[in-house]
Image: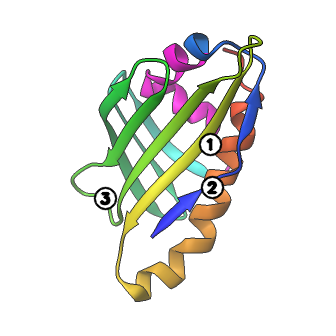
Amino acid sequence: MNITSRKSTIENSQEEVFNYLTNLDNLQYLLPKGKYSDWEGSEDKCSFKIQGFKIPLEKVETIPNEKIKMKTAKGSPVDFDLNIELTDNGDGTTTGQVISDLRVNMFLKGMIKKPLTSLFEYMAERLEKVDY
């Protein structure tokens, strides 16, 4: 199951945004305040609890200035990839988008699609507001 957020316009260069987001500790600034707990983050890994589930993520690949690819790590109740894709708009701004590929059964899909869609949309909105 794929979930794709809306595209966000970020008032910073593609390189600035990429450099900021490649440190996974900075992902906490894209998450909804008060909706997650137990944040732990480093350059290449992060984890947090949201709606009672612990979500560990690890960086698996970066394409300089264009994409940060993450996936859930061992111990996650849900198996998914999370990508942040960045496009240079040519005017000092960047377009950002959050894209996820979830590998879940039909029962779980029905339970998590709406909350995860809301989360990824919120993250896309936050891309526009973070201090890079």
Q: What residue is rendered at 45% in x and 70% in y?
A: 1
Q: Position of residue 61 (x, y in %)?
A: 30, 31
Q: Which residues are magenta?
A: 17-34
Q: CA distance from mark 3 to mark 1?
A: 18 Å
Q: State left or right for residue 93 relative to residue 71.
A: right
SS type, badge 2: helix
User: Which residue in the structure is indicated by mark 2?
Assistant: 119
Magenta span has 29? yes
SS type, badge 3: loop
Q: Residue 31 bears which disc, if any? A: 1
**Which one is earlier in the sequence, the residue at label 2 or at label 1?**
1
Q: Nearer the viewer, residue 35 or 60?
A: 60
Q: Position of residue 118 (x, y in %)?
A: 67, 61
User: Which residue in the structure is indicated by mark 3?
Assistant: 76
Q: What residue is rendered at 26% in x and 49% in y?
A: 73
SS type, badge 1: loop
- Do the residues bearing badges 2 and 1 touch, measured as CB atoms within 8 Å? yes
Q: State left or right for residue 17 relative to residue 62.
A: right
